[in-house]
Image: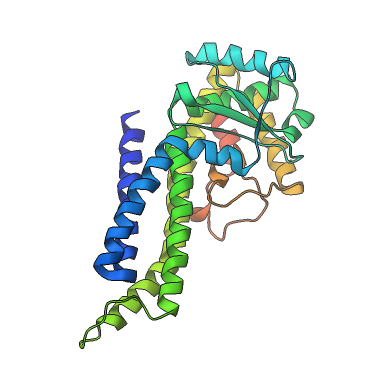
Amino acid sequence: MFGNFFKTFFLLTLMACLFLFVGYLIGGEGGLIIAFLFSLIFNFFTYFFSHKIVLMSYNAKPLSEAEAPRLHAILAELSQAAQIPKPPLYLVNNPSPNAFATGRNPKNAVVCVTSGLTEILNEDEIKGVLGHELGHIKNRDILLATIVASFASAIMFLANMAKWAAFFGGGSRDDERGGNAVGLVALLVTAILAPIAAVLIQAAISRQREYQADATGANLAGTPIGLANALKKLSYASKRIPLEASPATSHLFIVKPFSGQAIFNLFSTHPPIEKRIERLVGRYE
């Protein structure tokens, strides 16, 4: 828990520093002040409202008990086993089967599933998936994961700012010793490296948390078999019917929502499904 708190604080601080750095490169001291104010506002909304932004971005709607009584019953049972409040259940009307959890703590968390998930999984497999998502909530991964999503979006925004600033002359600072040229180079480097940094941060944080959520979910369900079978089905189906997910939020889902393969495993936000299943089953043998 403390580790995730430290990572969250670090990411928010790093986000603010990036805004200040790019703001100074683009507009000098004036740009620094504007970037400082913008970073305060951005961090405030990231902490308190980023989960709502994620739900809105996928047009997720609340799923009532009357609409899905069995899903709610399973979620209530698993939440009791995890000793956390039962989170609200949301639905994304999409045939690509997937699920994610978001929110800043167990009291403000939500679990979201796609319509395609309930169409291809049996009850034991759904129990494994919901257990996995509750694992993220119980382990307090959700705030960190949601902030990483916002952080990745912010980095992409900063990279575009840097690119256009470099295109239009590299900022307002200039002096006789070539300060403008230095600023131009710095902006170009920022525009190139920032998106790579975003992907690496997503990957480094997300992969280990997926393994931990798998283990917690299997413990809550009482067996790893349902989750292991669900991962196989979801992995295959997501390649056949990819979900149009933003790269900035792709790490939130239980399996990678689109079929594109990373050039190196270093850039993948999800561990290989085979490795996840191997670890799951291995813990119970």
Q: Is 162 above or below relative to 91?
A: below
Q: Is 35 above or below relative to 229?
A: below
Percent coordinates x, y for residue 83 in the rendering: 47, 13
User: What scheme was used to colour the molecule?
Assistant: rainbow
Q: Quadrant of the C terminus?
A: top right
Q: Is 35 above or below relative to 218?
A: below
What residue appears at the point 31 percent right and 30 percent down from the top-left corner? 2
Which of the pair 218/26 is nearer the observer? 26
Give the image quarter of residue 87: top right
> Would residue 283 be visible to someone looking at this image?
no
Q: Is 60 above or below relative to 261?
A: above
Percent coordinates x, y for residue 124 in the rendering: 69, 20
Work out which residue is located at the far bottom of the displayed protein and give it: 176
Q: Is residue 68 left or right of residue 88?
A: right
What residue appears at the point 27 percent right and 59 percent down from the top-left corner? 33
Work out which residue is located at the far right of the displayed protein and give it: 119
Which of the pair 105/229 is nearer the observer? 105
Q: Quadrant of the N terminus?
A: top left
Percent coordinates x, y for residue 207 in the rendering: 49, 42
> Would residue 32 be visible to someone looking at this image?
yes
Numbered disc total? 0
Give the image quarter of residue 121: top right
Percent coordinates x, y for residue 224 in the rendering: 60, 23
